[in-house]
Image (cartoon, rainbow, N blue to C red):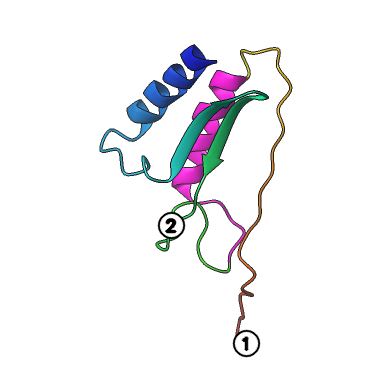
Amino acid sequence: MSKLKDQLLQSIHHLDQQDKLKDQIEITVTAEGLRIELMESAKGTFFELGNATPTPALRDLLAVLSHELSKLPNKISIEGHTDSLRLFRTA
């Protein structure tokens, strides 16, 4: 799992060479396997506030993660949540 963690971090670094996402992504080796946590920032790194549409940064990151993880026979569990703000539109 440590090797996979290193490969993922390397792939993410190629995606984000300025490491702007490094504080938003935490990869940990656990007894269950590899835990990848994507932590939203106040600036809305992965979703805009009150919106469920992924940002381009999240789409790119998920493409990298899915490419690397698809090489494994392991099962994957995904959990997540969005903020509870509603997006109001005026006519």
Closer-to-camera residue (78/52): 78
Instruction: Tell me which amino acid carries mark 2.
Output: Ser
Q: Is residue 41 above or below residue 2?
A: below
Label 1 neighbourhood size at 10 Å, few (<14), some (14-19), many (20+)?
Answer: few
Which residue lies at the image location 70% right of the left edge and 27% below the top edge? 76
Which residue lies at the image location 42% right of the left edge and 63% below the top edge? 42
Residue 22 quadrant: top left
Q: Position of residue 34 (x, y in %)?
A: 59, 25
Per the model, the C-alpha gap separating discs 2 and 1 is 30 Å
- Residue lying farthest front? 31
In the image, taking residue 64 as reference, residue 17 lies left or right, namely left
Residue 81 quadrant: bottom right
Predominant SS along the magenta part: helix
Q: Secondary structure at mark 2?
A: loop
Quadrant in which the N terminus appears: top right
- Residue lying farthest left? 18
Q: Secondary structure at mark 1?
A: loop
In the image, taking residue 56 as reference, residue 75 lies left or right, namely right
Q: Position of residue 27 (x, y in %)?
A: 49, 31
Earlier residue among tags 2 and 1: 2
The numbered mark at residue 41 is 2
Which residue lies at the image location 61% right of the left edge and 65% below the top edge? 83
Which residue lies at the image location 69% right of the left edge and 44% below the top edge? 79
Instruction: Tell me which amino acid carries mark 1.
Output: Ala
Tag 1 residue: 91
Observer-side mark, 2 or 1, equals 2
Magenta stretch bounds: 51-69
Label 2 neighbourhood size at 10 Å, few (<14), some (14-19), many (20+)?
Answer: few
Q: Is residue 62 magenta?
A: yes
Q: Position of residue 10 (x, y in %)?
A: 37, 22
Q: Position of residue 63 (x, y in %)?
A: 53, 31
